[in-house]
Each structure stands twice: as C-alpha cells, then as structure tokens.
C-alpha cells in the first residue's frame, strides 16, 4: 500500500556518500487534527499529501509538493486611529502638488528646498515654523519637547509624543535620542516649532527600525521646544532592583533627591496653569522627602547634609500646600522645618500663614510677628500681616452679625428656659458631643488615607478636655501613635502613623 500523510517538513544539510546530493528533507508525520496548531519557522503546511514511498525511494525521481504560504499579518496599530488622523502630515506625500513640474523630485526633496543646513554636510536641515524667544538652549541643558517623526511617503507618524500623551525630556550631550534629533534641538529657542530633515547617518542608520523605519531612511521630525533648564534628568529608581536600592550610597540618594527638588522648582515656576503647576511641584518635593527620610546615614556629616536639603523641601512643600488650601499639611511641614532650624524665618512665616488661613488668626499673627522680629524690614511679612488683619476684621463682623441674631432669638425665651439651657450646656462640656466625635473621627480617617502626611498636630487650646480624651482614645484604637508636643507657650497633640517595619 502506498503511504500518504500530511507531513511537517524540516530541511537539513549533510553529505550523502551514496548520492551526490547535499540536501534532504526530514519527514515528521503528524496527526491531521494538530496540523494547524504548529506555527514556527521550521514547520510548513503542504497543499497536498506527500507520497512517502516515492519520496523515500533512492531510485525514484522524488516528490513534488506545494507549500501553503502563511497569511501576511495585519499591521500593528501603534496609536488610536482617530488621534492619528489629527496628526497626518500630507507634505511627506506631496499631495498638495507643490513643485510638481519636476517629476523626479521626491516629497523630501521639495521640503529640503525650503530649509537651511544646520551642520556642514547638510545631513540635518531645518525650517522654522514658529519663532521662539530668548537664547538658544545651552549645551548640556535638559530640554522638554514634543515631536513627531515621519518617513517619506507615509503621512502617519512612526513616533509621536503627542499621540503618546507625554512630553519627552532629553539632556543634551548624553545620547538619549538619535544624534540628528539632538543636533536639531540644540539649535532651538524656547517656544520654537521647527521641521528637521535628518539623513540616515544621523538617524537610524543602514538597518533602520523595521517595520516602520526602512534602512538608510531620511526622516522628518516636527519638533516643539516647550522649555529648557539646567536641571539634570532624575534617574528612574523604579527600574532599580531591590539589591541596587539596598546598595545605593547616600551620595547617590542625595543627588537624586536634589534632582527631584530642582524638577519641583522648575514645575513651580513653569508656564502651566496654577493648580496643575503646583501639584506637579509638590509631587517632586514629596519624592525627594521620602528618599531622604528613609536614607541610611553613616556619620554626622551625612545627617547634617540631609537636614539641610530636607529643610528646603519642607518649606517648598509647605508653600505648595498653602496655595492648594492644604493648611493642616502645610502646618505639619512647617513644624518639621522648625524642628531642624527653630530660628528659620520662612518656617515661622509659613506656619503663620497656614494658621491664619485656617482661621486661627491669633496664632497666625503670633508666628508672623516672630518672623518679623527677626527680619523687621521684610515687605512680604508686612503685607501678610495686613492681609491677616483684613480677613480677621471680616470674620469678626460676620461673627458679630451671627451673635446678634442669636441673642435676639434668645431674648424671646423665658428665664427658666435659659437656666435649663445653661445646665444642659455645662453637662455637654463634660462629654464629647456626637458632632465633635464625628468631626474628629473624620479627620483621623482622612489622615490615615492621606499618603503624604505622616503626622497631624492638634492645638490643645482649641479642644475641650473631653474632646482631647476622645481624640487620644480614637487614635489609639485606629492603630495610630499619640504624643504631646510643647513649643514655647503652645501645646499640641501630635497624631503619628506607625513606621512600617523594615524588610528582613
């Protein structure tokens, strides 16, 4: 019986002494039910079964067969189609027909005619679409850019920061992007938007980046320089292994923390809208603080340096908190700053700000006056005192009107009712009212959920003895720590989160 099987075929090369041939096929019989499940570079499907007797007969003529060609895979969609449509560049296809009298001219040839060379051999050409301002970005600065890259005859970008929804930061001179793009950015001013044609030797070379960028391809980059600064790029510690983190020196941690701090300063002084700008700055300061607070210190010198940088970070973060209306958080950061430097004028000033913005006007005035005593001529302190006085006058007027309405209502009641109310009030003072309990419980729960705050102070002169007792008990039941803090004439109850146990 002649044997016919669907087979998988692998080609091997060896020398056959009996036949002057160097190629045979290794035949592997497989179950027909599984034939569709094998897909790799060594196995192929055949259109017809193979006659094994004929194929294996040394005197035969062999067997002819036809391979089933695999279907071409669909092109991978790198970006959302609707978003891509907004960023099509028709010029790379020359669809507008410009310079069409030269049939041999390519779209990039047409674009290059409108450009000038930024390096001697013309490998990087430039066309300014929107003029920037200020000086050209200095060497070794960090640039924040948006860009889109195109190859000729393809109006869909092969890469786009806008489609990815995130700007790109590059440090000039560190080779983080292709050489041509770095050269291009190095010619720009803040706010500038320009086109750059980059030859393959300054782009992706003879190999390209298949399948999107062919070998030896000239590419077009549309680049917008949003901002630049001398702040170094922050190393991505998320990519570090646990062992690498454990072995990090204090100098490495300090460098990264300072980079976060400078990035926060850049964000704070940036061009974005207020809330977004302050929020970005605060997140950078928080990262730096966490790094330093958990750093392992080898000697007093390292501790002094850590405190010096932490002092700046606490003050900067307190300012962000005040501007975002997070006054309890600002107060906590000011207290930490004063623990490092009890005579720090900014810490006193911002502590006063945080207090009076929380309607604790007398305490706020006390701390701002302490700052003024150390720096009597500071115009900012004087202006803050005037703002405090105006706000306090407004609140006093509001309270006065409220009390007048209350007393008017009270006068219409009987004397016996007044006596009963007074007795009831005295009885309430002995207990923490349900309203106060709810308020304190809410504050504690919000504190626990807050990933930033590690401690929360309560001024004891704002609480009754019953409320203080209830607060202490509730905090302990929630697994929090409670401490009493004395600063000058003020007394605080400090609620702290327990420190996580170190990993073994």
Image (cartoon, rainbow, N blue to C red):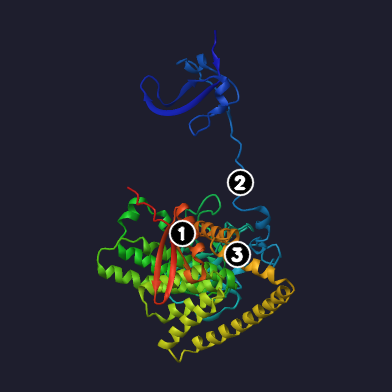
Count of labels shown? 3
Q: Nearer the viewer, residue 373 or 153?
A: 373
Residue 389 x %, y %: 57, 85
Q: Nearer the viewer, residue 445 or 239?
A: 445
Residue 429 x %, y %: 55, 65
Q: Which residue is mark 3?
A: 108
- Residue 123 visible at all: no
Closer to the chain start, of discs 3 and 1, is 3
Q: Nearer the viewer, mark 3 or mark 1?
A: 1
| Label 2: how many Cα within 10 Å (few below 14, some 14–19, many 20+) | few
Closer to the chain start, of discs 3 and 2, is 2
Q: Nearer the viewer, mark 3 or mark 2?
A: 2
Residue 45 x %, y %: 56, 27
Residue at 51% x, 72% y is: 320
Residue at 38% x, 65% y is: 256
Q: Which residue is mark 1?
A: 472
| Label 1: how many Cα within 10 Å (few below 14, some 14–19, many 20+) | some
> Element under label 1?
helix
Residue 75 tag number: 2
Residue at 49% x, 26% y is: 9
Residue at 30% x, 71% y is: 304
């Amino acid at each position: 019986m002649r044997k016919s099987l669907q087979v998988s075929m692998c080609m091997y090369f060896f020398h056959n002494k009996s036949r002057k041939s160097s190629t045979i096929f290794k035949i592997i019989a497989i179950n027909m039910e599984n034939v569709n499940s094998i897909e790799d570079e060594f196995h192929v499907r055949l259109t017809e079964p193979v006659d094994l007797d004929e194929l294996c007969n040394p005197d035969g003529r062999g067997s002819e067969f036809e391979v089933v060609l695999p279907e071409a895979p669909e092109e991978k969609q790198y970006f959302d189609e609707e978003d891509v449509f907004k960023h099509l560049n028709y010029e790379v296809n020359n669809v507008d027909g410009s310079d069409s009298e030269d049939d041999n001219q390519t779209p990039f040839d047409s674009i290059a005619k409108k450009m000038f060379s930024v390096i001697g051999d013309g490998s990087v050409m430039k066309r300014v679409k929107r003029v920037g301002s200020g000086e050209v970005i200095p060497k070794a600065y960090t640039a924040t850019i948006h860009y889109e890259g195109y190859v000729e005859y393809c109006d869909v970008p092969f890469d786009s920061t806008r489609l990815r929804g995130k700007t790109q930061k590059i440090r000039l001179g560190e080779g983080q992007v292709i050489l041509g793009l770095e050269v291009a950015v190095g010619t720009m001013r803040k706010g500038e938007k320009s086109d750059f044609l980059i030859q393959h030797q300054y782009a992706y070379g003879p190999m390209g980046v298949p399948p999107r960028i062919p070998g030896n391809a000239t590419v077009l980059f549309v680049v917008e320089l949003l901002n630049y600064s001398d702040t170094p790029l922050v190393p991505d510690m998320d990519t570090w292994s646990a062992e690498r983190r454990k072995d990090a020196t204090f100098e490495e941690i300090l460098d990264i923390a300072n980079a976060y701090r400078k990035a926060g300063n850049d964000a704070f002084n940036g061009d974005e809208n207020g809330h977004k700008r302050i929020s970005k700055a605060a997140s950078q300061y928080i990262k730096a603080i966490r790094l330093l607070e958990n750093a392992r210190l080898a000697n007093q010198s390292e501790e002094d340096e850590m405190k010096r940088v932490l002092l700046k970070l606490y003050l900067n973060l307190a300012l962000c908190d005040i501007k975002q209306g997070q006054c309890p958080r600002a107060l906590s950061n000011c207290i930490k700053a004063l623990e490092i430097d009890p005579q720090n004028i900014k810490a006193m000033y911002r502590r006063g700000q945080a207090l009076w913005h929380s309607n604790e006007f007398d305490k706020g005035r006390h701390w701002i006056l302490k700052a003024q005593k150390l720096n009597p001529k500071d115009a900012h302190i004087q202006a803050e005192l005037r703002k405090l006085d105006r706000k306090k006058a407004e609140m006093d007027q509001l309270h006065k009107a409220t009390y007048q309405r209350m007393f008017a209502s009270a006068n219409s009641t009987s004397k016996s009712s007044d006596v009963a109310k007074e007795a009831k009030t005295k009885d309430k003072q002995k207990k923490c009212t349900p309203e106060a309990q709810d308020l304190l419980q809410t504050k504690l729960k919000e504190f626990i959920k807050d990933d930033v705050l590690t401690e929360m102070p309560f001024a004891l002169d704002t609480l009754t003895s019953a409320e203080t007792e209830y607060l202490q008990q509730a905090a302990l039941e929630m697994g929090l720590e409670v401490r009493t803090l004395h600063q000058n004439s003020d007394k605080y109850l400090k609620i702290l989160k327990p420190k996580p146990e170190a990993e073994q």
